Image (cartoon, rainbow, N blue to C red):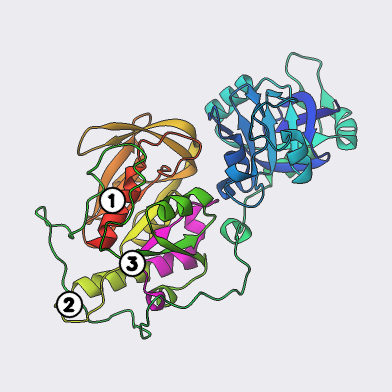
Amino acid sequence: MKKAYLILADGTVFEGNSIGASGRVIGETVFTTGMTGYLETLTDPSYFGQIVTQTFPLIGNYGVISEDYESKKSWVRGYIVRELCEKPSNFRCEGELDAFLKAQNIIGICGIDTRKLTKILREAGVMNGMIVSGDEAEKMSKLISSDSAKAVIKDESVLKEIRAYTIENAVASVQQKQEGESLPPASHSVAPTPLSPKGQSPLKSPNGGVTGVSPVEGVGGNSGAIVAEGETSPHVALFDFGAKANIKRELEKRGCNVTLVPYNTTAEEIIRLAPDGVMLSNGPGDPAENVIIIEEIRKLCEWNKAILGQEKKDGAQKPIPIFGICLGHQMLALARGAKTSKLKYGHRGGNQPVKDLESGRVFISSQNHGYAVENDTLPPFAKLRFINTNDGTCEGIEYTDIPAFSVQFHPEACGGPHDTNYLFDLFLKMMNA
């Protein structure tokens, strides 16, 4: 195998072997603790701009299975594994992972101490890195000093280049719909609606919140609930901020008709579409950079408040329940007045424990994010519902003034634990309420 190097922004150098494509790439170096699901990781748009380290030592043992992709292509900048399996064995296997990486033009490295790398990222925090392989590795070897136990890069210009990298325009870069594609017609005719309409009053629950099913009820497990007899199939507008395919699958499994709408869809367009619910998807990058998207989410929330603040009339419009996941959770919180900040090394993997503050129950969740909503910035009408038991960060919010809730983790986890899959059932009940 050809030689390859991983160079971190602090000057640390790892020497290993080249996998995937050859060349040179810079990205934000992160680690994920998932024992399975490497295909879902590689095709998750949330990893846009990042060089992903798999902490599990053997990757590729069940090969490539296109049915497990979360999107049509891989979005990672680079890929790091301890050992790449060259002879996968699985009845669903369609090919080898190395061939997939080459076809996707993903530059990778194997044969390095991923435990050491993970410890560095945990102590120092997420940092930029560069992978070089092939001819680029030969050139770079002349700039690397290995006189001591720690190999370092001697050329300051290389480190300057690595440190200068930033993830930009992330959400727009991972769109799976073609730009300029118009929204499909609404399932039933609704006239263009102003953002301060007359409508119906909220139906209060016993605790003073909006009637619906609170995302505190239910139990874990993959229920796969379907629409009850006599009920119509709910129409869900799924905002594509980098949506994982399994979000759509989980909604459709429950009998929902799903319309994937582009990230730049306006609140007015959503209201004209007249969905029964809105799903705010996962996605990559800093949530606070999406100023225009956040403003449209804010308008949609204000429209919901206006609908609920009017007297109930025959034929009046209904509020549109909102469910946010990951980036969608963060942008909904920003739209409602909260703040977000970057975590030291993020939460990535299928073993993240989250606690329901009301029931006291702890769930194991799948996560992939580098930012979090700041707990002490939540407005009065936003109730902190879930926290991460490792560091106490916000993992879920329940809004009491409109039918909306959101979670930082992934209830659609694939692969991963299904403990919180019931949240899709609660969203379905909220739409049918």
Find disc 2 in the rendering and name its residue.
Answer: 310
Compared across the picture, whether 165 is left or right of 243 comes to: right
Find disc 1 in the rendering and name its residue.
Answer: 426
Q: Marks 1 and 3, Cα distance to the nearest angstrom?
A: 14 Å
Find disc 3 in the rendering and name its residue.
Answer: 276
Is any part of residue 341 visible from this angle? yes
> Which label number is shown at residue 204?
none
Q: Is residue 283 magenta?
A: yes
Residue 301 x/y as whole percent? 32, 67
Is any part of residue 403 visible from this angle? no
Residue 78 x/y as whole percent? 70, 39
Q: Amino acid at mark 1?
A: Leu
Q: Quadrant of residue 388?
A: top left
Compared across the picture, whether 161 is left or right of 372 comes to: right
Please say if the residues under marks 2 and 1 sit with CB atoms less than 8 Å apart.
no
Q: Amino acid at mark 3?
A: Asp
| Magenta span | 271-297
